[in-house]
Amino acid sequence: MLDMRLMEFSIVNILTGYHVQLTNQPGQSVYMSTIVDGAEGALEMFTLVGVYSPTTFYLHHTARQNNGESPKEWQLKNVIALPPRCRYFTVGATERLLFLRCIRIAQWDDTARGLLPEDNEFDLFSLDVKTSELKKVCRAKHYYPPNLVHSYFGFPPSLSKPSL
């Protein structure tokens, strides 16, 4: 992980405490963890977890604690239920927003061992990491390779596009 203030890399162990428990639950899959800069410089992590019967996804929001005795454990802050009947992917993060792509699910395909999309479109959601507020940003066509979110805000003036 790169600390942008110090311009130093460090190693962050994401499989401690709470996250070890998440990986050992039957009937669910842990997909992706995204680390963001939280309150007062603390690290916070959002872990995408899917449950397949019925198809439901959750974001497990944890924060890294360092209380002196136990070395930097991740503690659960909250669990955010995402709108149902979608397959979710984390597609980007900024200082205060996490972006999720939702492909609506029509049915489970046993022969392909996968989910069939409802149509050729996907929804893009933003999650405010401070308030846990989830907002639908837009709906777009799904292309291969999948669309990614590229944020164009928060850059220093020297890296920003000129604007009026």
Image (spheres, rainbow, N blue to C red):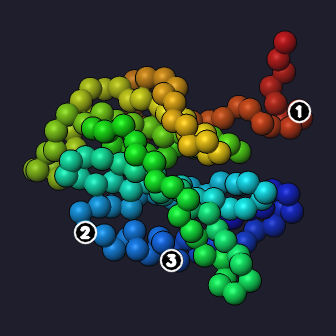
Q: Picture coordinates of residue 60 (x, y %)?
A: 47, 57
58 vs 33, nearest the viewer: 58
Residue carrying label 1: 157
121 vs 126, nearest the viewer: 126
Number of other residues with Cα within 10 Å of mark 2, as a class: few under 14, some 14 to 19, many 20 or more: few
Rounded to the nearest angstrom, the CA distance separating label 1 from label 2 is 48 Å
Question: Quarter holding the C terminus?
Answer: top right
Would residue 97 be visible to someone looking at this image? yes
Q: Which amino acid does label 3 sit on?
A: Gly
Q: Which amino acid does label 2 sit on?
A: Pro
* SS at badge 2: loop
Identified at 44% across, 38% down, the residue is 101
Of labels 1 and 2, earlier in sequence is: 2
* SS at badge 3: loop
The mark lying in front, picked from 1 and 2, is: 2
Numbered badge on residue 26 = 2
Quarter of the image where one finds residue 116: top left
Q: Picture coordinates of residue 69 (x, y %)?
A: 69, 87
Q: Picture coordinates of residue 156 (x, y %)?
A: 86, 38
Residue 44 is left or right of residue 160, and the answer is left
Residue carrying label 3: 17
Point out the residue furthest to the bottom here. 69
Of labels 3 and 2, earlier in sequence is: 3
Point out the residue furthest to the right here. 158
Quarter of the image where one finds residue 106: top left
Quarter of the image where one finds residue 20: bottom left
Identified at 62% across, 36% down, the residue is 150
Q: Picture coordinates of residue 10 (x, y %)?
A: 73, 72
Number of other residues with Cα within 10 Å of mark 1, as a class: few under 14, some 14 to 19, many 20 or more: few
